[in-house]
Amino acid sequence: MTGTDNKKIGFIGTGKMGEALIKGILTAKLIAPSKIYAGDADHAKLELLEKECRINICKDNCDVVLGADIIIIAVKPQTIPAVLGELKDSVKKQLIISIAAGVPIETFEKALPAGTKVVRVMPNIAATVREAACAISPGNAVSEEDVSLVSDIFSSIGRTVLLPEHLMDAVTGLSGSGPAYIFMIIEALADGGVHEGLDRNTARLLAAQTVLGAAKMVLSNATHTGELKDMVTSPGGTTIRGIRVMEERGVRVAMMNAVIAACERSKELGRKK
């Protein structure tokens, strides 16, 4: 049993993240489909979700707000001002959760009635396979119980961490953009396998499973990643030869700089809003 059992959850926006959350919540059996309300400008998409998930769909975003206790805003950042203008007279005591990248909590608190509870969450694309990394930042009016509710919801699609909002740009650079870096690594590993004679599908499978297995080892215990690396690296063996090449070519610093560069770009985009 979780704190969400007697709550109704509304979704404004049912794109990749919104849909992933709905399906994650239902798969985890946090609440029944009858307690989920969803609104989207794409009515055809809504009707497909209604048939597939048996949720309630709303043709008007205000109807979503009126029907739910928790509102998850999952629209593109540039549409946030229009959405908040539409909702401001309907929001009463609902808990507002935003997954709009780069939009600060202050934007919601200023646009909505005073005292509105706002939580900002940064998930990533792995939400679509229920393996997301999600950072949660609560606003001024949010209670510990509210944070627990948000954690329950987002734990249904992966793992969560609680962080102050000023670290959200770092989260964007690391876990928000990170899947793209890993896709490139998997592709490169597979290319190496193909170069050495493996067929493409086999190389792709071996590369992806290798990354998955390594990640599970990191998450399953507190052993330092350097020690885990040493477990695979025998004296004079194949692995240390490969590691030497990676160090010579600056793979480690390239990965660090990718995260830093993405973080800086996130800050730039935030200043433009």
Image: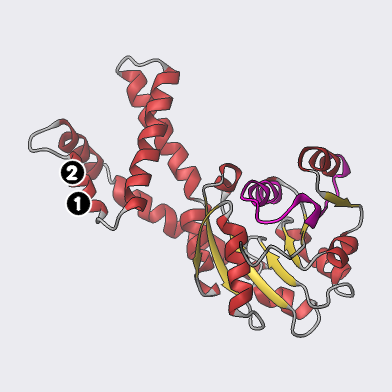
Residue 240 position within the rendered picture, expressed as x and y whole percent measured from the top left: 16, 38
Q: Which residue is mark 1?
A: 227
Secondary structure under badge 2?
helix
Q: Residue at x 72, y 70 (%)?
A: 96
Residue at the extreme front of the image, as rendered:
1
Q: Relative to 250, say whether 162 is above or below.
A: below
Residue positioned 48% across, 54% down in the render? 175
Q: Amino acid at mark 1?
A: Glu
Q: Is residue 33 magenta?
A: yes
Q: Is residue 105 visible?
A: yes
Indicate the quadrant containing the N terminus: top left, top right, bottom left or bottom right: bottom right
> What colour scheme was applied to this rendering of the protein?
secondary structure
Q: Classify the position of the C terminus by image quarter.
A: bottom right
2 and 1 marks in contact (CB < 8 Å): yes
For disc 1, the neighbor class at 10 Å (few under 14, some 14 to 19, many from 20) is few
SS class, disc 1: helix
Q: Please say if 106 is above or below 87.
A: below
Judged from this view, the residue extending furthest toward the bottom is: 114
Q: Residue 185: x percent and y percent?
A: 40, 38
Q: Would residue 206 be found to the left or right of residue 272 on screen? A: left
- Residue bearing mark 2: 231
Left or right: where 78 falls relative to 20: right
- Left or right: residue 118 versus residue 165 is right
Instruction: Determine the image quadrant of residue 105.
Output: bottom right
Task: Residue 162: say if magenta.
Answer: no
The label shown at residue 121 is: none
Tell me the distance, in whole angstroms, between the alpha carbons under discs 2 and 1.
6 Å
How far across and down, in percent of the image, does residue 152 sit?
59, 62
Q: Which quadrant holds residue 191?
A: top left
The magenta stretch is: 17-44
Q: Give the residue drawn at x 64%, y 79%.
A: 142
Horizontal relation, residue 39 to residue 223: left or right: right
